[in-house]
Image (spheres, rainbow, N blue to C red):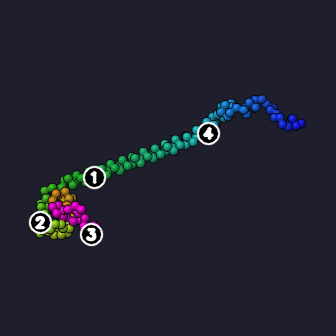
C-alpha cells in the first residue's frame, strides 16, 4: 500500500502531455460561434473608442466652423472701422496739431494734459481726444501716462522726452 500512495497515477496520457507543454503551444478547439464571440468581445472597446473619437472630431469641426465665422465677422468689422478712419479728412487735423505745438512752445510748456491742451487751442476736451491717434502719430508729440494719475495721459513735446 505504501507503494501506491507514493506513486502518481496518470489516468489519461493525452492530459498528461497537455500538462507538460507550455500554455502557448496548447491546442484549443472552439466552435465558430465561440470564436466570433471572443473576437467581438475583444473588438468592442476599440469600436467604442472609435465612436468616441468620431464624436470628438465632429465637435471640433463644429467649433472650428464657429470660430472661423466669428473671426470673419471680426475682420469684417475691423475693415469697416478702418474704412471709416481712412475716410477722415486728414487736412483738418494737422492745423490743430500745429496750433497746439505753437501754443506749447509759446507758453514754454514741456507737457500738458488733454484738458489743458484743449483750453490752449480753444477746443473741447472731447475734440482733443478725437485727435489722440493723430497726436500719437505726430513726430512732434509723445503720449505718456501721468505719474500722479494712472488713467491720465499727458501730451509731451518729443524734444523734451527723456526715456527712463
Residue for point 81% across, 32% down = 11
State the separation of the CA atoms marked 3 and 1.
Answer: 31 Å
Which circle's residue, 4 or 1, is located before the other in the chain? Answer: 4
Residue under numbered circle 3: 149
Classify residue 61 as left or right of residue 124: right
Q: Is residue 75 above or below residue 108?
A: above
**Residue 138, quarter of the rendered image:** bottom left
Residue under numbered circle 4: 41
Residue for point 20% across, 53% down = 86
Residue under numbered circle 1: 78
The x, y position of residue 3, in whole percent, is 87, 35
Q: Quadrant of the N terminus?
A: top right
Which circle's residue, 3 or 2, is located before the other in the chain? Answer: 2
State the separation of the CA atoms marked 4 and 1.
Answer: 56 Å
State the separation of the CA atoms marked 2 and 4.
Answer: 88 Å
Dot in front, 4 or 1: 4
The x, y position of residue 51, in whole percent, is 52, 42
What residue range appears in magenta? 143-164
Which circle's residue, 3 or 1, is located before the other in the chain? Answer: 1
Which circle's residue, 1 or 2, is located before the other in the chain? Answer: 1
Instruction: Please state which of residues 66 and 108 is positioned toward the viewer in this rendering.
Output: 108
**Residue 6, quarter of the rendered image:** top right
**Residue 83: within the magenta?**
no
Q: Is residue 2 visible?
A: yes
Q: Secondary structure at mark 3?
A: loop
Pointers 4 and 1 in contact (C-beta within 8 Å): no
Q: Is residue 79 above or below residue 95?
A: above
Dot in front, 3 or 4: 3
State the separation of the CA atoms marked 3 and 2.
Answer: 25 Å
Residue under numbered circle 2: 105
- Mark 3, Cα crowd under 10 Å, few <14 / some 14-19 / many 20+, is few
Amino acid at each position: 500500500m505504501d507503494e501506491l500512495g507514493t506513486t502518481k497515477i496518470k489516468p489519461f496520457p493525452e492530459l498528461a502531455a497537455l500538462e507538460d507543454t507550455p500554455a502557448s503551444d496548447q491546442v484549443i478547439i472552439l466552435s465558430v460561434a465561440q470564436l466570433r464571440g471572443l473576437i467581438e468581445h475583444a473588438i468592442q472597446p476599440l469600436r467604442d473608442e472609435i465612436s468616441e473619437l468620431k464624436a470628438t472630431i465632429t465637435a471640433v469641426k463644429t467649433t472650428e466652423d464657429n470660430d472661423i465665422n466669428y473671426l470673419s465677422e471680426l475682420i469684417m468689422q475691423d475693415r469697416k472701422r478702418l474704412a471709416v478712419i481712412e475716410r477722415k479728412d486728414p487736412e483738418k487735423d494737422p492745423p490743430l496739431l500745429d496750433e497746439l505745438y505753437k501754443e506749447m512752445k509759446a507758453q514754454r510748456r514741456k507737457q500738458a494734459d488733454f484738458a489743458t491742451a484743449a483750453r490752449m487751442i480753444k477746443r473741447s476736451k472731447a475734440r482733443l481726444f478725437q485727435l489722440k491717434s493723430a497726436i500719437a502719430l505726430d513726430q512732434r508729440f509723445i503720449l505718456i501716462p501721468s505719474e500722479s494719475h494712472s488713467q491720465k495721459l499727458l501730451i509731451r513735446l518729443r524734444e523734451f522726452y527723456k526715456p527712463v
